[in-house]
Image (tube, rainbow, N blue to C red):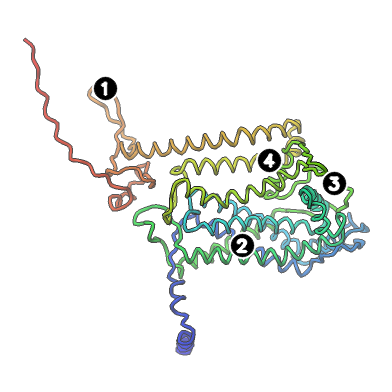
Amino acid sequence: MRAIERTAKGVDERYRAATPLRGLLNKVFPDHWSFLLGEIALFSFIVLLLSGVFLTLFFDPSMREITYDGPYAALRGTSMSAAYESSLRLSFEVRGGLFIRQMHHWAALLFLAAIVVHMLRIFFTGAFRKPREANWVIGLLLFWLAFLAGFTGYSMIDDGLSGAGLRIAQAIVLSVPVAGSWLSAALFGGDFPGHLIVGRLYIVHVLLLPAALFALITVHVALVFVQKHTQWPGPGRTENNVVGERFVPRYALKQGGFFMAVFAVVSLTAGLFQINPVWLYGPYRASEVSAGSQPDWYVMFLDGAIRLMPSWQIYLGNYSIPPIFWPAVVLPGILTVAPMAYPWIEARRHRDRRRHNLLDRPRDNPARTGLGVMALSFFLICLISGGNDIIADKFHISLNAMTWAGRIGLLVVSPLAYYVTRRICLGLQQHDREVLAHGIETGIIRRLPDGGFVEVHQPLPPAEYAGWVVPKKMNRLGALAPAVKGFFVPVERKPERKPQPEKELTSR
């Protein structure tokens, strides 16, 4: 112990490491389940890195033609690319290869899902406001980088399903006015599919995108440490403090246990549920496209938007803009730029330049919550439309009717979702105000002298509505102990004058 003490003292004397390290270890984090959504994304990314290193050792990113002679009898003797053959070898010949493949795929789906849900939590609670605008932008960039990482990951296998998706990607590139054909030739090294695309996707997937994701995640976590962590309003919580647990030891131990839980869930899912059985799709042939081809969920909403877009071809002289350009190029651009600019738009609209460390409840900002639900309904309609052919086939519905239902839904359901959500938020606010004014329902019924019945209400401390959580049940009254000291905003009321007895009026 003395040797360790002397070593630590020597390091501190030379590099002054104790002061910044002490600040790091004493960092306080609030404790709430909604804050774990970001940790799920971080931990699933770690699982992706670990499983991806294993897969890299056995995958051959080459499009050279070989004849399959492996244990899967259905494809034996079939001509295929080396990339697809190595995927089959990983699945059937490498010990634990199929398990790691499925673990990598499930972790990728969880990574994208956790990012989306985490961003929704940030949006609905207003955690993107000053001074966290940069972290909001980084979160959006993380989603699109993860989107590209997932697309390049399942595209480089060169099976029948991923090849169809790669063909759609080439059509999207070709739809870019003027430069589309040049971009496609540069990307594929000539005509589709060429002999270079798998190798290029491999480099992008295993080197460039992971490096960019790692860098942005590092900056994102560093900003969380540098800036104060957001927290929910409550007793003793203000815009200038953080109420929670120190980073070391309890919070760090809890995060370590949570990582093990995420790792266990991904492992269990990979072992029990099959995903992306590439041996069933066969090798990709440019002349063959199988029916019922759908991408992963985070790409399917763009596929649905493409299916819903009317066939409007726009001609400008010798050039034309195909219909696919609007949902596949313009729409992602809008979905990137508009959310990035929203923190500044909202701040300018409300003329709000203050620092915000306390979160909003979604009901307390009806307009923002309505916009979020409207965007979510737009996404879900596009997501369902991405599989409208499967739905039409299984439920015996007209595919044309499904397409028109999606188009009408985008124009009707999304604005309606905004209106309904806004009215619900206003109604919830009004209910909170009524509880503050009249008290909590106790369930005790009292009979009046005139024979009527009323329910007894437990009065609350005099307060006005300020966005705090208002207790609605009697078993929540224990949280009211510090109410007067900050849970509610006290209201100064003038003392009421005692009522004077009414004089009896008699008539002669």
Label 1 vs 3, first from the N-terminus? 3
Residue 279 appears in the figure? no
Label 1 vs 4, first from the N-terminus? 4
Circle 3 is placed at which residue position?
A: 289
Label 1 and label 3: CA atoms lie apart by 77 Å
Label 3 and label 2: CA atoms lie apart by 36 Å
Type of the residue with mark 4? Ile
Type of the residue with mark 2? Phe
Q: Position of residue 241 (x, y in %)?
A: 38, 61
Of discs 1 and 2, which sits in the foreground? Answer: 2
The residue at the point 30 percent across, 44 percent down is 463
Of discs 1 and 3, which sits in the foreground? Answer: 3
Label 1 vs 2, first from the N-terminus? 2
State the residue in front, 74 or 61.
61
Circles 3 and 2, Cβ within 8 Å, touching? The answer is no
Circle 4 is placed at which residue position?
A: 384
Of discs 4 and 2, which sits in the foreground? Answer: 4
Type of the residue with mark 1? Gly
Q: Secondary structure at mark 1?
A: loop
